[in-house]
Amino acid sequence: MSEAFDLIVLGAGPGGYVCAIRAAQLGMRVACVEGRDTLGGTCLNVGCIPSKALLQSSEEFYHAVHALEAHGIRIDRIAFDLARMQARKSAVVEANVKGVEYLFRKNKITWVKGWGRIVAPGRVEVSGTTYEARHLVIASGSESMPLDGVTVDEKRIVTSTGGLVFEEVPRHLVVIGGGYIGLELGSVWRRLGAEVTVVEFLDRLLPGMDSEVAGQFQRILGKQGLKFRLGTKVTEAETDGAQVRLRLQPSAGGEVSELVADAVLVAVGRRAVTERLGLTELGVRLDERGRIAAGADFSTSVPGIHAIGDAIAGPMLAHKAMDEGTAVAEIISGRAAHVNYDAVPGVVYTWPEVAAVGKTEDELKVAGASYKVGKFPFTATPRARAMGETEGFVKILADAATGAVLGAHILGPDAGTLIAELAMAIEFSASAEDIAMISHAHPTLSEAVKEAALAADGRAVHL
Ligand code: FAD
Ligand code: NAD
């Protein structure tokens, strides 16, 4: 049996489901094949959304314990119910997943359940049925990177998926990897009372983020009680079912030490999913890091097959996948579209948040660029003082000659929301002066952005 479509999308994560919806809006007959039981991919099911739900709940608890007294609010007994917290998280996931189901129905997208294999250009086989389409888009996403010597059982030694469903707070959680997942989930369990040790291979956290921001962020997390073993690698982890014994070594080699944990979270990066799709047989080329090689128009080495999201190069972020999903749908339907990767923000949803867009100062130094820096601390921002959230700063990097914003980095309250203005500045090739001329409401956190823009020209007022 065979059914014909204009477009078949493989994978219903943020890349795939957005691509399917946009293509349907553009008048195409669309099918979306998804192997897991629900729509939404990694992000909605076991990624962005459940982690943000737990970050929110744990933050509410931490705030109640540590911050309310300073506001003159006394609560005599504060406790949390982890089962209820986890149930709330599941409800948040379900609401989002159902939302995508509704959008599929609204846009008349056929949801094909099962794992899809491309048997020829334009032909996808799912559980014995072949579906045909003029265009195929692979949006197969990514999975946790395994680590030699550390076998994941998703109980004691977990990936982020297991780290989202603990039924008890581990007494001691060792997190391998001080990146996005390690610091977000490490924060969740620390706030709920776990002792958390982050073991990071490099001598800093969050590689890829501005090193000044990462340094100050580490100090803040340290004050929240997270412990760090930087420049260290885990060579082996052994579990007896109750505890895990880890062997650690300096990254450059040297004396081995041991650490005992109740649970271990492996968060050393993610890799593209390219299995089960029939790519080798078709001759779809992969790049040097095993991702599907795709051009700026998302075409692969095989005509009629496009690829987007975590499965191709670029930051593994949901909004990047969504932007690519929209762009590829437009391109397939004969329109012009592109993604400006210089303006894709990245946000770590800890407290405080870390947000970045464009170049880091480290990158500008290496490139020998001529730039100026405008920095403004939240301690000098009236709204941040009123909130009692004064840690961190806004840092804007601008071209020395033209003032064009090259990069922006925010460590502080609601940094993830504040960064949008700076992504827009980069998208519109605006200068720091342009930002400084915009009226920013008082008292808001966004005044720190304006002041940092003024500071780039030595004109900050409140400093
Ligand atoms: P995915 O979301 O991985 O979806 C791919 C889908 O394709 C999967 O559902 C898979 O089952 C399906 N699939 C694969 N092969 C086949 C096949 N052969 N047939 C049928 N279906 C197939 N990003 C952010 O921007 N913000 C965040 O806050 C954030 N938090 C995260 C937290 C965690 C714990 C994790 C793990 C990730 C987080 N991310 C976050 C990253 C984000 O989840 C990914 O960048 C995003 O999901 C990528 O979207 P995608 O559509 O490319 O792939
Ligand atoms: P990551 O790349 O952010 O961090 C991995 C960390 O592990 C790095 O600091 C790396 O140096 C370290 N590392 C690598 N090998 C190691 C080893 N052997 N021992 C110790 N440390 C080692 O990866 P992640 O945290 O696993 O997350 C994967 C991706 O998912 C992220 O890069 C991001 O794109 C996405 N994500 C995004 C968000 C968000 O947007 N808020 C949240 C979670 C995940």
Image: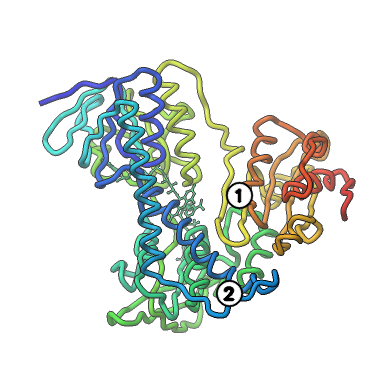
Q: Position of residue 377 (x, y in %)?
A: 77, 57
Total marks in image = 2
Q: Which mark is residue 398?
A: none
Q: How is the image coloured?
A: rainbow
Q: Quadrant of residue 84?
A: bottom left
Task: Look at discs 2 and 1 and give the one toward the viewer.
Answer: 2
Q: Is residue 149 visible?
A: no
- Does dot 2 land on a helix, a strand or a loop? helix
Amino acid type, label 2: Val
Amino acid type, label 1: Gly
Closer-to-camera residue (276/427): 427
Asked if disc 2 is less than 8 Å from ligand 2, the answer is no
As measured in the structure, the alpha-carbon distance from the residue carrying label 2 to the one carrying label 1 is 24 Å
Residue occupying image coordinates x 31% and y 34%: 284
Q: Position of residue 383 (x, y in %)?
A: 75, 55
Q: Which mark is residue 416?
A: 1
Residue bearing the label numbered 2: 65
Position of residue 349 relative to residue 105, above or below, is below
Residue occupying image coordinates x 41% and y 36%: 308
Question: Residue at the top extreme?
Answer: 334
Closer-to-camera residue (363/419): 419
Q: Quadrant of residue 115?
A: top left
Q: Earlier in the sequence, mark 2 or mark 1?
A: 2
Residue occupying image coordinates x 66% and y 45%: 359
- Does dot 1 land on a helix, a strand or a loop? helix
Closer-to-camera residue (260/89): 89
Residues at marks 2 and 1 touching, judged by CB atoms closer than 8 Å: no
Placement of the C terminus among the 4 image quadrants: bottom right
